[in-house]
Amino acid sequence: MKYRKLGANGPQISEIGLGCMSLSGFFGPTDETTSQNCLAAAVDIGIDFLDIADIYGMGKSEEIVGRFLGGQSRGLKIATKCGIDVGPPRKFNNSEPYIRNALRGSFKRLGIDYVDVYYIHRREADRPIEEVAETMGKLIKEGKIGGWGLSEVGPTSIRRANAVTPLCAVQNEYSLWTRLPEVGVLQTCEALDITFVPFSPVGRGIFAQNYPVLSELDPKDFRHAIPRFQEPNYSDNCHMIDGFKAFCADKGWKVPAAALAWILHQNDTMVPIPATRYASHVEEWAQATEISFTDDDRAEIDRLLPIGFAYGDRYNDALWNGPEKYA
C-alpha cells in the first residue's frame, strides 16, 4: 500500500480507505463475523483509513468498528460524520449543540475520544457555512478532532468554509460513471490543498468483478432506490461497461482495482473509499496501487466510458434532498 497526505497538515494515510457503510446492512444483511473479517482484511493489505457515519445503521457501523478497535486507535485513522437528523421528518442540522452531541455519541460507539476527520455529512442550507466552520475549528482546538471535512458540496461552499477553518477533506461521489466533481470541486480542492475523498468509487458495485444481480438484491438494499440500478437503465449501463470489463480482462486487471486505479491516477490528492462487507472484495482492491496506465490505456478507457455515459441519475428525487447542485 502507498500513502498520501491528509490535507495540508494532516497525517499520511493509505491511498485507499475503507468505507464502512456496508457493515451496517445498507447493501444487504451482514453479520458481526463477516464485518470483522472485512475490517481485518483491509488492515492486512495496508488500509489504515476507515470512513464511517453516525447514521450508518443508526450507529451500528460505528459500534462494529469500535469493537474492532477495542478501545484504541491501533494506528488507524478514523473519519466519521454527522449532520443528518433522521427525524422524522428527515432534516439536516449543523448547529453547534447538535454537532457536539453527535460527536459524543460517535466517541461512545467507537470507544475512543478522538477522530482524525469529522465531516458535515450534509450541509444545512439555511445556516451560514462560516458558522459551521467556526464550530469545527473549536473542536480542533479542543483536541477532539484532527481536522474537518464536508460531504456532497460544491466549490463555493468549500472556499467559504476553508477561509474560516481550513478543511482537510471533501467527500463527494466520484467514479468512472459519476464525473461531476471534475466541474470545479477537484480543481478547488487541489488549489486549497484539501484531500478529495471519492465515495462509491466502484459505482456502488457496478464496477465490481461481477455485476450485481438485481433479482438477488435484498429488498432493503439501498440500490433499489437508485435510477441507475432500475430497468431499463441497468441493462443499458451493464452493456456500456461490458467493454471496459473485457479491456481489464485482457490486461490481467481486476475490474474494481482498475476502477480505483483510474481515480488514483487523476492526481495525487485523492483517497477513494470503496465500501464492502466482504473480505474477498477488499483483496481485489489491492492490485489498484500497482496498476499503471499508458496514454493508450487512458484513451481506450475514455473511448469505452465517455464522460456522462451512465443511464439514469445517481439519486432519486427524495435522496437529492441534501447534496448541493452547483453545475
Image (tube, grey):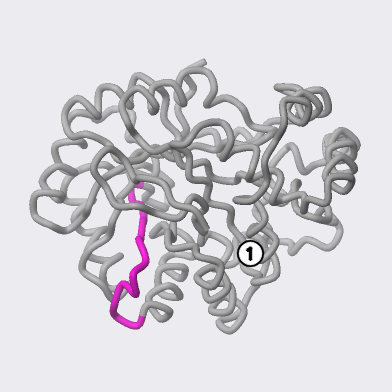
State the image coordinates of residue 103 (x, y, percent, origin top left): 24, 59
Magenta region: which residues?
70-83
What residue do we see at 89% from left, 40% from top?
242
216 relative position to 16: left or right: right
Say left or right for 177 vs 85.
right
Q: Is residue 58 above or below residue 252?
A: below
Query: x, y percentage for residue 216?
Result: 83, 63
Depth check: give the residue in front, 165 or 58: 165
Secondary structure at numbered mark 1 = helix
201 over 212 or under it: above or below: above
Asked whether residue 311 appears in the rendered view, the answer is: no
Look at label 1 and name its amino acid. Answer: Val
Q: Is residue 79 magenta?
A: yes
- Residue 274 in view, yes or no: yes
Q: Which residue is mark 1?
A: 282
- Determine whether, in the image, residue 98 is placed left or right of residue 53: left
Q: Is residue 54 left or right of residue 261?
A: left
Query: Going 55% across and 38% down the picture, which residue do you hit?
Result: 173
Question: Which residue is most to the top?
Answer: 327
**Front in this rendered view, residue 34 or 265:** 265
Decide whether residue 73 is among the magenta residues.
yes
- Res 279 quadrant in image: bottom right
